[in-house]
Amino acid sequence: MPTFKEITAADIKTSRSALNQLVDVIQNDISSSDTRKKYQVFVTGGIGPGVTSSLFQTVFDQDYTLQTANEVLDLTVGLFSGSSTVAGSTTGVDSAGKLLFPSQSLMMREKINVYRQFAQTLLGDADAQFSAPFSNPATTDYIDEAIFVNIKRLFARDRVKPQTFAMQFYTTGVVDSTTSGQPAYSNIDRTSTSGSAILTDAGQGTQFGFGGQVGDIAFSTLSSNVVGNLFYDQGIIVLDAKKVLSGTQHVSGTIDAMSSGGTAVIGSASGNPNAKFIPDFFVSGSIDDIVDHLASCRFSSGSLTALTFQNVTNINSTLVFCRATSDEFNYSSNPTFTDADGNIIVIDDPTSDRTFSYITTVGLYDANDNLLAVAKMSRPIEKNDEKDLTFRVRLDF
């Protein structure tokens, strides 16, 4: 049976510490279709067989069909409703106040709503606009076409540690050589081999906004060229597509479309020969088309690191100091410690031998004697009247 002693406020201390882990996401995890899951919840109607698409795609650390697969991050894109990209493609507003778009564009309202959702979460206003740099931006620094990378809680933990983020990204797509005005091949589905750049928050200042602490992301070779934001507490990266994609580059290839065949060719003589990644691809392509291109082409493929950072896990600790003075806990409450008359039977001579006990366990109880926590010793510890012992019990959460 246990022996009890009341714990006072002076015996309880609290502390806080942090644990950092290095996270590496390799290129194949992002580029492979086996590790990137789609959620095709958007369906068109009216023209042709229709187009289905996700609103975002999730990257896993292995084949996502396996039970042991872990979600690493989400990828999606969005458009600012007041941007020239949206204004140049809309045909008006209906009676309900919804923007109207021609059939040559896809998911424009969905892309706008994605941008608004992130703006509401990170900026506190769905109508607000992201900018890079985050504070005091010039007119040209506002983000009209955004790439969103949402790191999952399992890997971001409580937050991303500032000054530790880096991402390898191919800013230039494959150059689509042409023959007689026709593209010799598509550059939408070909992995980029040039224009590799490291995007990082190293050397950039941080500040606090509605979404918590935020820092700027810039090219490692030119820290003044800010291309996005990193919201550390949320684990969300916002990139300006125009700055990281060489948006004026010609784009060509087959995309989903509202047509009799369900697809269309962009960047050809018969399909907008002057098409560019921005705005044409971001307007005409579905979210799946755009994310497929970003994941499979702009992060490249292989075993190299595509994205790395350190996370922060906050550890809150309660330290309970269980003190046993020289005249306490020298007797066991075990019935075999004494005989029927109450005499100690584990010592030979009561006049010369000291009583002692071995402490093996410390239990913490509430005011109603309910056991809340148990601490086990690595070995029994002797206690006698010549020893003052203090056991420190640490509860982490």
Image (cartoon, rainbow, N blue to C red):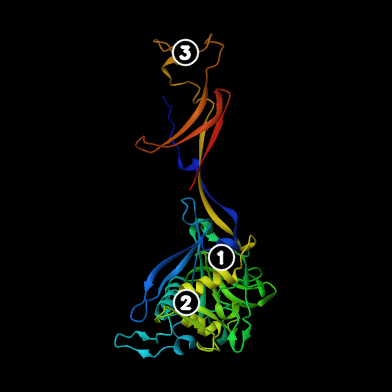
From the viewer's perspective, is the residue at label 1 or at label 3 nearer? Answer: 1
Q: Which residue is mark 2?
A: 78
Sequence-first tag of 1 and 3: 1
Read off the residue under disc 1: 31
Q: Quadrant of residue 223?
A: bottom right
At x 44%, y 13%, the residue is 338
Tell me which amino acid carries mark 2.
Gly
Can residue 125 be seen from the camera position used here?
no
Check whether the beta carbons of the residues at disc 1 and disc 3 lie within 8 A of each other: no
Residues 123 and 327: in front is 123
Q: Is residue 288 left or right of residue 22?
A: left
- The residue shown at (43%, 35%) is 6
Counting from the top left corner in percent of width and height, residue 226 is at: 61, 77
Number of marks drawn: 3
Q: Is residue 284 above or below residue 343?
A: below
Give the residue type at disc 3.
Answer: Ile
Q: Relative to residue 393, is residue 278 depicted above or below?
A: below
State the residue at coordinates (50%, 82%): 265
Q: Secondary structure at mark 2?
A: strand
- The residue singled out by tag 3 in the image is 344
